[in-house]
Structures are given as structure tokens and as C-alpha cells.
Image: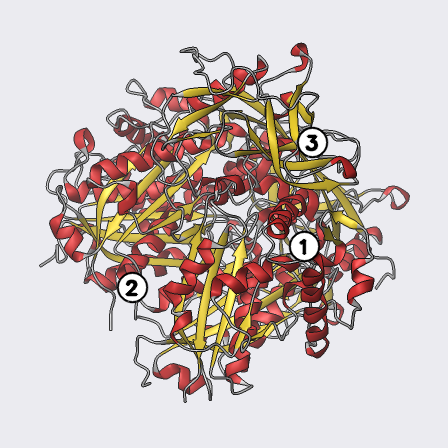
Amino acid sequence: MPDVVHESVFNLQFPFTRTLGSTLSTFFSALAQGQIIGVRTGGRVIAPPLEYDPDTAADSGTDYVKVGPKGTVSAWTWVPEPTHLHTIKNPFAFAFITLDGADTAMIHLVDAGSESAMKPGMRVEATFKPVDERVGRIDDILAFVPAADPAPSAGAGESWDAPAEPEISTQDSYCDLVYVDNTSASTLLWMESLLAGKLVGQKCPVCSRTFVGPRGMCCVDAIELDETNVVDVPDRGVITNFTVITPVQYPGQLETEPFARCSILLDGTDAVMAQQSILDIPADQVRVGMHVAAVWVPEAERDVSEIGNRGWGSGGDCISGWRHTGQPDEPEENYLERMM
Amino acid sequence: MSHQPVAVVGIGQTHHKKRRGDVSIAGLVREAAVRALEDANMDWGDIDAVVLGKAPDLFEGVMKPEMYLADALGAVNKPMFRVHTAGSVGGSTGIVGSHLVGSGRHKRVLSLAFEKQSEGNAQFALGGGKSGSIGAGGAFAPFIRAYIRRSGAPEDIGWRVAVKDRLNGAKNPYAHLKLADITIDKVRESPMMWDPLHFLESCPSSDGACAVIFTDEDGGKAASKPPAWVLATAMKSEPSTFAGRDPVSPQAAHDCSDEIYKAIGVTNPREQIDCAELYVPFSWYEPMWLEAHDIAAPGEGWKMTERGDTALDGSFPVNMSGGVLSSNPIGASGLLRFSEAALQVRGQAGEHQVGGAKLAIAQAYGANAQFFAMWAVGSSLDPLG
Amino acid sequence: MARTENDIAIVGFSQSPMVRRSQKTETEMMLPVVQSAIASVGLTKNDIGFTVSGSCDYLSGQAFSFVSNVDAYGAWPPINESHVEMDGAWALYEAFVRLLQGDIDTAVAAGVGKNSNSDPSTLFTIEMDPYYLTPIGADPWSMAALQARAYLDSGKATERDFAEVVARNRANAKSNPHAQLSGDFDIDELLAADYVRNPLRRHDLPPTTDGCAAIVLARGKKAYDLCERPAWITGIDHRIEAHLPTMRADITKSVSTALAAQGAGVGNAPIDVAEIYAPFSFQELIIREALGLDASTEINPSGGALAANPVMVSGLIRMGEAATQIMKNGKRRTLAHATSGPCLQQNLVCVLEGDE
């Protein structure tokens, strides 16, 4: 067992595109113009508006009302060290802010300079991003700041004539999360063997099944498997099944041409490695029954950094793929039911 | 002791589309829920508990969205429950909802399942956010290849299913794909995606939601429209990979239908069951499930497809709604199967109604063809009697 | 009171060590815990009628992360199985309802959470309203702190009361061999620490924990076959509130907990021990008030979530700890509470009773 625990950092990043529907479109279109609105429903003004009355789930309708831009802080907290997901980078407050003309509070940032400036009941005022930077999202309001003049907002409580077709109907939402996976003992065993240029499995002492790409347990007998259960397995086998995948394009996708992924039954074992790639022959010439052997990356260039706990049996950057050995194909009856 | 009778008295679904650009996530689920409430002649306040199902949260990028959706679905001050069992989740959502009534915990329960796939990208999510995702098609294509080899089925079976389900979908006002002019040639000539699956043999990516309202025996008998009675339910799982597992005809699929048939006294499913909604995201799964659920003998399922038995006017109609091949809001797809079976025995399926359907089954499956959910619904509590 | 075949009890409980960082995967954490819970009542995996777990894809950052967890059950031949994207306490609720169907008499409910792979202050921003809160990075610590501020402003407690909750829980945890954080803490020293989110200090926040727990349930007579003194579930209920805390009438109260407590029959008789899942110190005070508990009830002998907080498991651990008080310690009537969502949005209450 290596004494260094392998950790892999994974950034889960994706640009989601949200569609907004009538109420949110109306709100965010107004917001991009610098106007905050609420909706009058169930005898009160909810701001920012919801499509439904939270108490009854009834449609909240279209009786939109101008609120703010000033409001009153009820509860607040201070964020001394903003994270990468917070929209301003200096220390700030989150607060419940009841905007003038509204009966419910909004949760947003208060950029007050210092914690000591925060007081319950303080009057704050929205500051917007410059017009050309607004996208119709809640952070078009940069933050609230202490109001220079505590007097009520002009126009708050007046009706807002919403356009029939709000300008903004979608919203980008960027997911940006960091994961640090530490590699399990069984995966470390796998990495070590790959770096040494060999394949290993773990053999269940009860049912004698061999699991390649060690997963630390027998999923049939529900017992833990460890280094004492490790067995060497050949790096040669027979293709028992495959498919050819036409890659779908999405952010982060690098594949552009159709590629084959094969299940390979390792010689003399009951172990199958799934989703393996085949080298040197076009995807449309891959067939079941082919004898193949692993093609190892030169020892000095082997890299297991891409191997994590996500997905068993990946050869990482140690096996570049599998190559046809040239032997005659295996008769079908010897592999037909052996795809797992 | 045994559970109390459970009736389906309300069914609602959205119009399924590639992108429902006109609604938020809340708007999407509310559209289905409001239709179900109207169908049941109920209001939000009549519902005692809500069960929400959907596939991975990574599809929309909202973690545990039932929290944000609690007020949108009228669950404030009520129980709200969230199920996630991979592709079978829509079925599980229905089953858990029915159990809440059958156990006597609640009188009226709303089960709702949804997916708003257009917010993100399922291939991205399934690939763990990395390059080279094989997607669901890449995962299932090898099983299909094995089925073809094993059964000796001709290559056009998948094309036939693709055509049949799309023609059914063209009769379903809510279906995403309405391909009334689809032909075998068009399927065959469509691009190969995951050999042997062509583009037109694969499910679309949809935004959509489905809602079902359950009530007890008294509620079912008092309903303004005919109810569907939930006669039996089953959820079975097995590990994803081990030597000796048969992913082509998984044991969990067999066990699921065996348990259902035993519970309701079905000894000859082919004759006694009137129609079935089976989870067929890729064309070949129709014959595969017909065999796994003992509707056809091993190796014979494709012959039912070839003969036209599974067509809407055939002797054993399958996927009358157009199935997953016509609409695939992933998390909702299972509940759409379950609700179509209920629509059939209620006689409410409109243009895709099977005449006189009294007993129907519905199934959903997920992950590496290892999670199964199934139910049987009847026009009465004893449709075989 | 004579038990019937409709009565369901907790008969077995097992939990992993609660640690800041486990080197195991979720599946590897689950296997020994689930199998030891089953073995503790003299059964084997194939005897179990229904298995259900709670976990969260976004904790590991991978879609369908729970799929491999089926390996931990040895689900062959295939098993009756389900999964919830909720704390294991709700998995137990599904198992309870499933047992009421009457065709099976044992079930396992598990929860697992490898929390250490991510940072809760960023991860849980995506649990918030996707239009109004996630885009401004509204984090769970800030949301809790806003609730804490409102609670202080209501005059019902002081920051010293918060610190006392912390000191008591961590002192209790000294006798819990599974706890991650335990020890004797001086209130004044705690209060001298900086705020992480005013008015909350680091000790008011839960630790980040990897862990797993599993509970075995049995119905009717079977419970006596498996356990000398079953912990009978005499009441269980759960409720949710509006998502946005600003849409709730008074966030210094937990309406959903009070409703669930009423549904579970908490007030029908005294409660000897209550295990409360309060991720943030002051929330214990809010929950305690909503449950209507008086000074005679012992709170969190395990140390609660301030001693270990494996998200997706913490609620189920409360149920296991409350059941252990009956099964092993001879207590008569105990309570377990679980929560989920920002500012105690969703709450579950379970009342357990031993035979006279």
C-alpha cells in the first residue's frame, strides 16, 4: 500500500440555461431595466414575485407592483471571506430586505463596508450593474448599500404594466463546484498495478468470481475484498461485445468521430473489462470474437492521475487501448453469454 | 393483514417538447399537477402528501429540487417525499405514492415526476462531466447486440418498433415526437448512433412532467370519472456487473413480473393482460421486455413485433402512448408509462385507447438495466373475475 | 400495550466511525455497516424483505452515484429495493410504509454520505431557489445565520445559549465512540472565537463528516424474534415548509416540526430522551420548543450533529440512537428528529416506545 493518498481534483462546471416562464420573465425583464417588482396575491405583495402563492399554491396572477429600490433590513449576517460563488469579492452581508411597497422580504447582499455598519432596521438601497452588463438575473442588483436618504422610495406600490412579451425569457446559470476525491484502497491497488504494467483483480473467496478494476467487495456475497484477495489476470482477452458510439457534442466533449467501446473477457478468467477502446482498426471493423491484447503506454509515460473512484476498470493513461493479436477469432459459443 | 385498495383518480401530463421555453421548472411541474387535479375534480388543498421523482439532479443543476418546489406543489405544512431510483424512478414515484394510500397513511396523495432536460445536457451528466460519455445508448447497445445474436431476430425488428411507437405517439396530444409520416426506410436511413441503433430508434430528449393522484376505496368509488385500481406493485434491483449476470434478460425484470402476476392471479399474461406500457428507450427493448416479462417465450418476443401483435390494433398492444421513443422527460418517463396503463383501464386514452382494456401493466427500468418498477392496474378490483 | 402485526419496530442499528475524511467510497462505507446491522439481529442479507437507502448525487458530484451502492447489499438474487435523494431518516419512512403493505416483515434503511469531497459552503448553494438564491451564492451557513439573527432578535436566546448547546453536545459525545468531535469546552473561550457568519462561530456550525448508518426494521411478532426489547415506532410524521425562509411567517419557530410532532403523538406521554438533528447549534433550541419538550427530557446523549454531521445520514443516526436508548438502555419512550433544507425547511419526527 503506498503511503501517499492519491487525491484527484475535479471541477464540475456546466452552463445551465434556465427558461423562466411568465412571472420570472416579467420580473427579470423589469430588473434588467432597473425596476424591481413584486406581485400582489393573497392580499399581500410578494417581492421578488413567485408564480404561486406559497401558502395555497394558487396561481399568483399578474397584478404586478413596483417595489424598492429602497428597503429595510430585518435580519443580516456577515460574510468575512467570500467564496468563489459569492458575487462580490469584498466582505459583505446577506440580509432579509423588505423593499418599500412589499410585504415579504428579499434575500440579497448588502455591501456595507464593514460589519459594524450593519444594524437591524437600517435602510438600504439597491445598486444595479451598469445597463450594458445586466443580463436579467438576480445579480443584476450588484448589492444593496446603506441608503443616503431613508425617505420612502418614490413610486413604490404603484402598478407595473408588464409587457405581454417580456424581453428576457431565459437565464444562464453557471454551475462551478470543486470536488476532491481521495482514492480508495482498492483503486490504489489498481493504479499501482497499472503503473507496473500488469492487470490485477480481486477474487471472492466465497463465489470465486474475479472482479477486475478492483472495487473492494464482492457484490454478490456482500463481503469486503482487500489486498489479500488480489490475483494477477492476463492483459489479453476476447471481445465479447461492443458498440460504436457517435459522439454527442457537449461542453467538455473531445471526441468528434465515431468510436468503438468493447467488453473484453480476459483469457482464462471470468472477468470482463467493459468500455475498452480498440487501436489501429476502424470502428466499423471491430467484431466480437477478436483476440486482443492490451497496449501499454511506455512505463515512463504512464499516468494514473485521471483514475479516480468514478468508474471501474479504466486503464487511465497506462493502457492506450487494445490491439488485435492476429489469432483466429474465438468460436461464438465460448463467449456468447460473457458480456459482464 | 394486507394493504387497502388504491385508486388512481387523477392523471395529468405536460405537453412534452425538446425545450419547454415557456415555463420555469416550477411552471412545468405545476402544469402536470393542475391537469391531474382537474381530472380528479380536486384542488391543491385536497392533497394530503406529495411524492416527487426525477432522475439525477445534475440534469438541471438543482440539488434536491423538491425543496425549492415544495410551495409550487402545494406541499407547505404537508409531507413531501423525494424518490430517485435511476430510470425506473417515475415508476417508483407512483408506487411510493400508492403505498402511502394503501397503508392508510393518507387519503389523497399526489405523485409527480419530471425532467427539464433542456436546462442542461444529459450526456454531460451521465459522463460525469467528462469527455467521451457513451450515454445511455452506448450503455444499452451491447445488450441489444447480444439479444439479436441470441434470438436470431432479423435486423428490421428495431425499425418496426420505432415506426409503431411513433405512429402511436402521433395519436397522443401530449407526445414530444409526432412523426405521422415515419417509415421503415426513414428509420433505416437515419444516422447510426450506437451500432446497431439508428437515430430514429432512440428516444428523444424531452422536457416534461407527469402527475398521478391516488385515493382510497371510498374516494375511488366516489370519483367523477372511472378510476383505475392499483392491483399490484413491485420494485426489484440487482447489482450492475458481475460474472454470470444476464443484462439482456435481467433476473430482476423476471422477478418483478413474476411477483405482479402471482399477486393478481395471472397465469397466462399474453392472454389475460390487455395491454402494456413498457420502458422502451431504444427500439429493441420491446421484444426484450416481452420475453423478460413472460409475455413471449424466450427468443420469441421479436415475432410478436414482426406479426404486428404489439400494434395499437394488435392482439397485445404495447406502448399505446407512443412510449419513451416518443417522449422522454427521463424522470417522468416511468410515471408516464404507469399513467398510460391507468388511462387505458379508465377508458380515458382517447385516440390511443385499446378497446375494452380491463387489465394493463406498466414497467420502468434504469441504470445498467438493473432497477425495475412495475404495476398492474385494473378497471375494477377483480378484472379477471 | 399489546403489539399487533401492524406495529413496526427498530430492532437493529449499526453505524460507521464518523470521520472528517474516509478513504472509502460510499459503497465501501456501506457494506460493513449494512451487513453488520443485519447480522446484529441474527439475519443474513437474503432474509431482508425490503432495502432502501438515502444518499445524494451532488455530494459525490456524480449522476447515479447510488447505483453502485446496491453492491453493498449483495443484491443477488434480486431484492426489493428503493432509494431516496433524502436523509436516511426518510428512507426509514419509506421502509415503514413498505412494511405496512403487509407482505414482508423485515426491512433495512440506510443512509450514506461522503461529505468530505466537497465544501458545504459552496455545494449547498445549489440546493437553494435556482433563480433567486443560487446565482448570488446564498450558502447554507449564511442562511442559518440569518435565522440565528432573527432568533436572537426575538429575545428567546443569547449567543451564550448557543455556545452552551455546543458545549453540552460535545461533552455528551465523549461517551459516543462513533463521534467525530467531543470534549469539554469552556463557554467563555467559545464565545471569544471570531464569527464565521455573524452571529455564528465555527463551533455553532456542524463538522464535515463522512459516515454511514443502517437500521433494521421488523413488523409484528417478527420484531420479538429478532430483538429482546424492540423500539416500537408508535408515531412518525414529516412536514415541509415554504422554501424561501422569507415566505415563512416566523423563522424563529419550526411549524413543520410542531405539525410532525403532533402527527407522531409526541405530547401523549413524557419523552425520556430526544435525539435532535440540529446542524446549527441554535436550531436545537427552535426544535426543542416546537417539540414541546420540557426539562425532564434528556437531549442528544450522542452529541448530535455538532459532534458528527454526515449529511444524508445524520437524521437516520438520530433514529438509531433513540432506538438504542430503548433496545439497550431500558428507556421507555424516546424521540428522533431529522431535518433537511435551508433554515429547517423540512422536518421529521419519530416516537419510539419500549414495552412496559
Question: Disc 3 is attached to a residue of which chain?
Answer: A
Q: Secondary structure at mark 2?
A: loop
Q: Position of residue C339 (x, y in %)?
A: 53, 57
Residue A110: mark in rendering: 3
The type of residue carrying mark 1 is: Asn
Q: Position of residue A137 (x, y in %)?
A: 59, 23
Q: How many marks?
A: 3
What residue would you read off at disc 2? B103
Viewer-side label of 3, 1: 3
Query: How far apart are the two marked residues, 2 and 3, measured between alpha carbons?
Result: 50 Å
The type of residue carrying mark 2 is: Ser
The type of residue carrying mark 3 is: Val
Q: Nearer the viewer, residue B370 or A92?
A: A92
Q: Is A159 positioned to the left or the right of A245 in the image?
A: left
Callout 1 environment at 10 Å: few (<14), some (14 to 19), or many (20+)?
many
Query: How far apart are the two marked residues, 3 and 1, measured between alpha carbons?
Result: 30 Å
Question: Disc 2 is attached to a residue of which chain?
Answer: B
Callout 3 environment at 10 Å: few (<14), some (14 to 19), or many (20+)?
many
What residue would you read off at disc 1? C115
* Relative vertical location of residue A127 with respect to residue B202 in this rendering, above or below: above
Q: Quadrant of the C terminus of chain A?
A: bottom right
Inspect this view and state whether residue A10 appears.
yes
